[in-house]
Image (cartoon, rainbow, N blue to C red):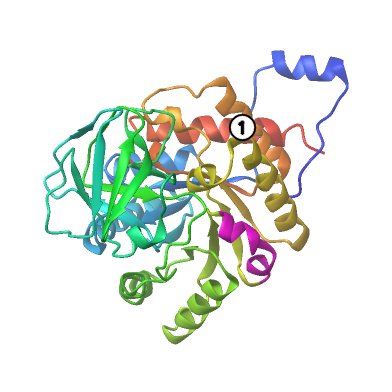
Amino acid sequence: MQGGQMLVEESLQLASILTSSNFRFVPSLTKIVGTLGPQSRSFEILEACLNAGMTVARFDFSWLDGDYHQETLDNLRIAVKRAKKQCAVMLDTGGPEVRVCNRTGRRIELKADNHITFTPDVTKEPTSEVLPVNYQGLAATVKKGDTIFLGQYLFTGSETTSVWLEVSDTMGSDVICLVKNTAVLSGFLFTLHVPQVHINLPALTDSDKQIISNWGLQNNVDFISLYTRHVEDVLELRAFLKAQNLHEAQIFAKIETVEGLKHFDEILQEADGVIVARGNLGLDLPPEKVFLFQKSAVHKCNMVGKPAIITRVVDSMTENLRPTRAEATDVANAVLDGADGILLGAETLRGVYPVEVIKTVGRICSEVSSHIH
C-alpha cells in the first residue's frame, strides 16, 4: 500500500484517541504473516489465528522437516474450512545459514571474558568450550577483531539467549573467540551471523531445492521467500520453479544483509515482493541506519507496485501479553511508511500468546488505516 498521510486537525486527533475503535468497519489493508510452529499448529489455535486476522501462514524450513510442517499445514486446511477464511502459504527456505547443531538440546552456558572455539568438526558435541559449525570456511572468512553473533534468535532483545563474540585468533580451520556477554544457549539449533562478511554458500541450497520440489510442489505453495544477496539468486530460483512447474508461486526476496542492500534495486526488478528482514539486518547495519533502509525499501516497493513486508516488530510479545510502547509505535510507523505486511516470527512460532499477538498487531494496523487519506 502507498504510504499515507495522517489527518492533522488537532480536535479530530484528540477525538479519535478518546473514542473506542471499531475495527469491524475499518479493515486493515496490511496483511499479517504468522510463522507456524509448536505454539500455533493445532487446528483450534490456527482457527483462532485466522479469526484474529492472519492471512498468510509461513513455514520456516530452517528447522524441523517436511513431515512436521505437513501436519501443521493439514491442520491449517481444517481451520480454514471451519473459519471460512482464506490463508496463503509461504515456504521459507533455509538458505546459506551457518549453524551450530546441538543434538542433545542441553543448555550451554557461556560466561563473559571466557574463550570459545568454533570448529568445522561436526562430530564434536557442543560445550561451553567448543562449538561445531556446519561451515568449513569460517576461519578463512573472519579475521581478528571481527564480531560474531550466535544464538537461537539472534538478539531479540533478551541478551541472555544470544551471545556477542569477538574473534581473537584462528588456528587452522578453528576460530577462537572472546565471549563478550554472559548467555545461556538453549535449543537444538543456534544461528551464527558475522556482520558484513560474505558467507560462501549458495542462496538456494540443495536442501532448499529438495524441499521446494517435494513439499512445495505437493502443496502448491503461494509464496517462496529466499535469502537474497544478488539478483542472480532470484533468477536462479525463478528458473528452478519453472522447471518444477511451480509457475504461479511468487518469490519474496529476503533482504537481511548489507550485500543484499547494495543490490536492492536490481533485486526488486526481478522479485515479486520484498521482506525487510530486520533481524540479521539489524546486526549487519548500525542500529541508527536500519530505519533509513526500511523507509527507502518500502518506498521503492510502493513506487513499482510490489509488496513490502516488515519483520521483527513485537519481539517482546513472545513472552508478554502486551507490546512495548516502542513496538506498538514501530508497527504503526511501518504501516504509515506503506508496508503491505507485518511478519511475525518467534511471536507466533514459539510465543505464549500467538492469537493475542495477531489481534494486537491487527488492531494497530486497523487504527492506522482508519486515519490514512
- Residue 226 seen: yes
x and y percentages locating residue 228 in the rendered image: 52, 64
Q: Residue at x 42, y 36 (%)?
A: 155
Q: Is residue 129 left or right of residue 31?
A: left
x and y percentages locating residue 33 in the rendered image: 49, 48
Q: Is residue 72 above or below residue 178?
A: below
Q: How many marks?
A: 1
Q: Residue at x 49, y 32 (%)?
A: 314
The residue at the far bottom in this view is 243
Given residues 118 and 208, the one toward you in this image is 118
Q: Residue at x 43, y 34 (%)?
A: 156
| Region of the chain picked out in magenta, as a range | 258-269
Q: Is residue 265 magenta?
A: yes
Kindly identify the amino acid type of the residue bearing the numbered disc 1. Asp
The image quarter in which residue 202 lies: bottom left
The image quarter in which residue 352 lies: top left
Magenta stretch, main secondary structure class: helix
Q: Is residue 115 left or right of residue 162?
A: left
Image quarter in which the C terminus is found? top right
Residue named by callout 1: 330
x and y percentages locating residue 321 in the rendered image: 42, 22
The image quarter in which residue 154 lies: top left
Given residues 346 and 340, the one toward you in this image is 346
Q: Is residue 199 above or below residue 357?
A: below
Q: Is residue 152 magenta?
A: no
x and y percentages locating residue 289 in the rendered image: 65, 41
Question: Regarding mark 1 in the picture, which secondary structure is present there?
Answer: helix
